[in-house]
Image (tube, helix red, strand yellow):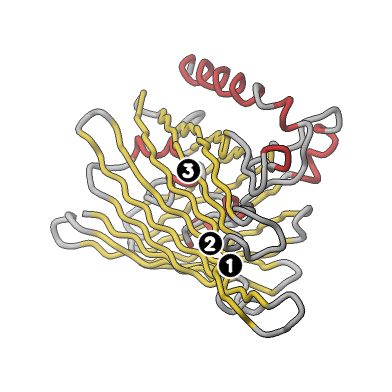
Amino acid sequence: MHRLLILLALISAIVLSFAPVMAQVSVTAVPFMTIEPGARGNGMGNAYAAIAEDSFGQFWNPGGLGFMDSKHHVALERSPWFEDVVGDMYLAYFGYNQPISDLGVFGVHFHYLNMGRNYKTGTDSPIVIDEFDSFDYSISLGYGVKVHSNLGLGINFKIIHSHLADEGAGSGEGNEGSGTAYGFDMGTLYKNMIFQGLSGAIVFQNLGGDLNYVDADQSDPLPRTLRISLAYQAWKDDLIGVILTGEAVKLLVELDEKFSEQLSEQTITGIGSEVTFMDIFSARIGHYRDKEGHVSGMTFGGGFRLLDYNDQYSGGLDFAFIPGGDLQDYNKKFSFFFSF
């Protein structure tokens, strides 16, 4: 337990070092980095940081990497995003994790949002003279280790790139349509922390520099985020498994004297559950609430998992429906995982 307290003190000191910058701004760049990948977690109310046991988990909480087994893990997702509004907008994710003997688990993940095709017209004419795609992506290298039988620590280093328009597509000159920034995540996962089956997680995400498209004076911060999550394995036998989970997410962008007053209104919350039958079929339900983002409602999902006879290979497919706010009723998520 004392190791966990030391780590939390260190993390808090690092986060507070960003406070003078955070207090000056309330708008973030690349908000796509707050869109969680992986339909399993999505179906449970977007509450997954205290589970984080697969390659999608590296995004939610790199502290979970240390608890991954000795297999290689691959995760893939390609899901439409607000397809009722923007027909060619989609999310994509790729994750790969590899254990290195007793040194821990290393991983890489690629997170991508394509915002669709845009068209450039002439200054005084509606005739299309050029086409370009707008997109954001991040590439992360992660490492996690189990420092105690119940405690895992992890970190991600990431590069973030945003491409809103080709050079010269707007009215200005130069590279005003693209920007690059660097950041990192830190996370902890503590299993059986009070009693058997209860896990807790604390994660800081997207700490680092600002992103600018024109110059440093017009830069925006990354969506620096704090996640606090609990998960409880309520039941587990050969036939049925039940997990209950909950999560609170707070953007650490505006830290001022009103922070405590804003905490309840600006905190995103999610709760959910998963019931698994014979370690093959799963059904999930949850509730997600983002008052500031005007997104609130039930989440639903399911999936299946298959093993070979020697338990050397496994894979599965998950799907989820998550609320789309004022723009559409639900976004559909689909993801795939494989281990060998």
Viewer-nearest residue: 105 or 230: 105
Percent position of residue 135, x then y: 54, 62
Residue 116 is left or right of residue 157, and the answer is right
Q: Residue at x 46, y 34 (%)?
A: 189
Q: Which mark is residue 159?
A: 3
- Residue furthest to the left in view is 310
| SS at circle 1 | strand
Question: Is disc 2 in contact with disc 1, using a CB cutoff of under 8 Å?
Answer: yes
The kind of secondary structure element at disc 2 is strand
- The 10 Å Cα crowd at callout 3, few under 14, some 14 to 19, many 20 or more, is some
Q: Which mark is residue 115?
A: 1
Q: Nearer the viewer, residue 73 or 185?
A: 185
Q: Which residue carries the number 2 mark?
A: 113
Q: Residue at x 62, y 57 (%)?
A: 177
Say if residue 250 shows up in the picture.
no
Real-space CA distance between mark 1 and mark 3, rounded to the nearest whole angstrom: 19 Å
Q: Amino acid at mark 1?
A: Met
Whether residue 154 is situated above or below residue 241 in the rendered picture: above
Callout 3, which amino acid?
Ile
